Image (spheres, grey):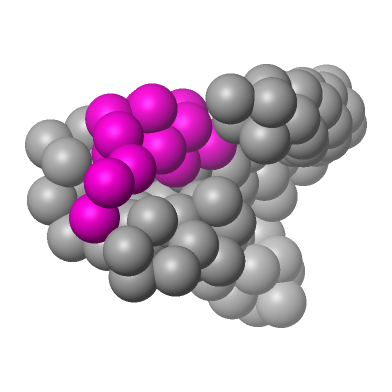
Amino acid sequence: METPLLITALFTFLISVAAFVIAYFQAKEKGPVFTNTYIYATKKEREEMDKKPEYRLAKIVFMMVGIAFLLITAGCITNWIVLFIAAVAVLVSTLVYAVVQAIRSEGK
C-alpha cells in the first residue's frame, strides 16, 4: 500500500471514529445539539424547545457520516471502487434525509 493512501485511510478512519463518538453522545442526549434549528434558536426558544427530535436528527446524521467515512477508509485499504460508490450513496442519502427533516422541523 502506498504511503499517501495509508495516510488518507488513517485520516478518514479518525473522522469516522469522531462521528461515531458524537453520534453516541447525541443518542444519550448529552452535550450540545448539532442542528441548525437548535443553533439558530434564541435562548428562550431553546429552553422551550423539545430537544429529543433534534438529538435524534443529529444522531442519525452523524452515524451515517461515520459509516460513509468508514466505507472510504475500507475503500482506501482495499482499493475497491464499489466502497467509494457506496460511501457517496450514503452521503447523498444523508443529505436528503437532513434536508427533509429540516423542512419538517420548520413546519412544526
Q: Give residue 22's position: percent from left, percent from top.
A: 31, 53
Q: In the image, is 62 to the left or to the right of 36? A: left
Mostly what secondary structure, the magenta segment? helix
Q: Give residue 89's position: percent from left, percent from top.
A: 82, 24
Q: In the image, is 90 to the left or to the right of 44? A: right
Picture layout, residue 65 above or below residue 11: above
Instruction: Indicate whether residue 50 is drawn in magenta.
Output: yes
The answer to whether residue 13 of the structure is visible from this angle is: no
Say which of 44 and 88 sits in front. Answer: 44
Picture layout, residue 93 above or below residue 68: above
Q: In the image, is 15 to the left or to the right of 9? A: left
Q: Which residues are magenta?
A: 47-61
Residue at the location (33% across, 43% down)?
49
Residue at the location (69% across, 26% down)?
107
Picture layout, residue 46 above or below residue 10: above
Residue at the location (24% across, 55% down)?
47
